[in-house]
Image: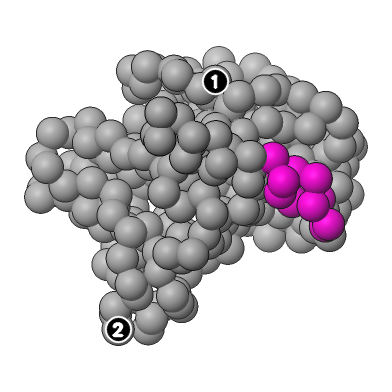
Amino acid sequence: MKQILIFGALYASVQVYAQGIGGIVFKETFELDSPTMANWSTADLDGDSNNWTNIAVTPDLEAIGFHGRVQVSSSASLSPDNLLISPVFDFPPTGNLDLSYTIGSPSGTPVHYAIYILPKGTVFTGNETPVFEETLTPEETIATPRNMDISSFEGQQGVQIYFRHYNSTQFQLVLDDVLVTSDSVNKMKASDANNTSVKIYPNPVANYLNIKSDSAVKSVKVIDNFGNNRNALFQDGKIDLTNFQPGNYTINIETENGMISKKIIKK
């Protein structure tokens, strides 16, 4: 009974965020006084007895921009596969939704991760479709802010966010400051992010993929089905995919408004 009551209190605190000032739907600082900190869970998918752990920032992590307490995924080998799963919460029925967080690694080498938003109680198999995934470059392994539109999940009840560190040759990934907002100060609107501000065509694509954005495009990454960051030339609003093998790819487009993730098919 105590466990049920404690879970209820924590779940209620998440709902208070949803009604709070500033449009905060869910907030996690990973500090020990965070009301939701105790209700995160983990899964050691590679079975090496290493997993996500809440730690106080060490000097090497502070040197790359992290502070306070953070979540760190580690592995005994260079093939980690660890899940960090948020408490259960609800998305509001209306409003544009943003997800932001800070990610990085002290390694200075590429590190891969993915994010999933799934119904509570989902038995994770690894075949789920991520809402976003990327391989951080050596330049991005400092504490790197990320912001993306997740308005397609508007109104969904009883969901959890999964952070997966996997498909990587680096055994450490650091996460901090997870925040979901509705009509927040970021104002990365769904209509702007997915419909108006960023458009890609043709899809399926044979050679050149056009990217049209109302705001400046800062970078474009092409991720294959194995999570690898593929070299692709982005110039004059186009990505040259001529020499890519047929298949499914994810295009991560960073604009001045945040990060957009699009799925494409290469013919």
Amino acid type shown at disc 1:
Pro
Which of the image's four quarters has the N terminus? top left
Regarding mark 1 in the picture, which secondary structure is present there? strand
Quarter assignment of residue 218: bottom right
Instruction: Give the SS element for disc 2.
Output: helix
Q: CA distance from mark 2 to mark 1?
A: 37 Å
- State yes or no: residue 148 in magenta: no
Residue at 42% from the left image edge and 43% from the top image edge: 40
Above/below status of 43 relative to 64: above
Identified at 76% across, 60% down, the residue is: 256
Q: Residue at x 13, y 34 (%)?
A: 47
Q: How many marks?
A: 2
Q: Which mark is residue 119?
A: 1
Mark 2 residue type: Pro
Circle 2: is it few (<14), some (14-19), or many (20+) Cα within 10 Å? Answer: few
Q: Nearer the viewer, residue 20 or 189?
A: 20
Residue 130: x and y, percent? 50, 29
Which picture quadrant has residue 45?
Answer: top left
In this picture, residue 89 sits left or right of residue 185:
left
Specify start and end residues of the magenta stretch as a single range: 15-25
Q: Position of residue 216 (x, y in %)?
A: 80, 58
x, y percentage for residue 234?
63, 49
Kindly check if marks 2 and 1 are in contact, taking CB atoms under 8 A apart as contact: no
Task: Look at mark 2 in the image and give the residue it sits on.
Answer: 59
